[in-house]
Image: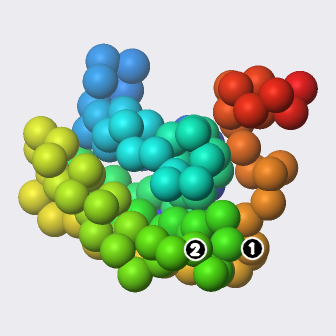
Amino acid sequence: MGGTEQAQGQGQGGGAGGGLRERVIEALRQVYDPEIPVNIYDLGLIYGLDVDEAEGRVAVRMTLTAPGCPVAQTFPATVEGAVGRVEGVREVSVELVWDPPWSPERMSEAARLQLGFM
């Protein structure tokens, strides 16, 4: 797999035609934070997304809005399931990280608008 990168940036795997990376991002956008009505991708909870299109492997590095989040034990499995249902994905790993801590600055412009931060 390629190097870990910010999920919001351009990365390997697929182009504008809906490659595996784009399908994975779309799946991540269907998963919502249980406490904030914004999807985890636009909320900035995805810190890294490695996609090996040829092998169908996806590695997700993510965080939660707070270490004490009540779903900390179960939410990575929710994300793994959502990504695992994407056509072309054969293997998924989800790593929950706490460094750097999440902050509202990580949110996309769309998420900030949705929450009234702009």
Distance from the alpha carbon under mark 1 to that under mark 2: 13 Å
Which residue is under mark 2?
69
Task: Examine the image and state in which quarter residue 99 appears.
Answer: bottom right
Q: Is residue 57 left or right of residue 87?
A: right
Q: Does dot 2 land on a helix, a strand or a loop? A: loop
Task: Examine the image and state in which quarter residue 27 appears.
Answer: top left
Which residue is under mark 1?
101
Q: Amino acid at mark 1?
A: Pro
Badge 2 density bin: few <14, some 14–19, many ≥20, Cα 10 Å: few
Whichever of callouts 1 and 2 sits on the residue coming sooner in the sequence is 2
Question: Looking at the picture, does residue 99 appear above or below residue 55?
Answer: below
Q: Amino acid at mark 2?
A: Cys
Badge 1 density bin: few <14, some 14–19, many ≥20, Cα 10 Å: few
**Front label number (1 vs 2):** 2
Question: Looking at the picture, does residue 52 appear above or below residue 9?
Answer: below
Viewer-side residue, 63 vs 8: 63
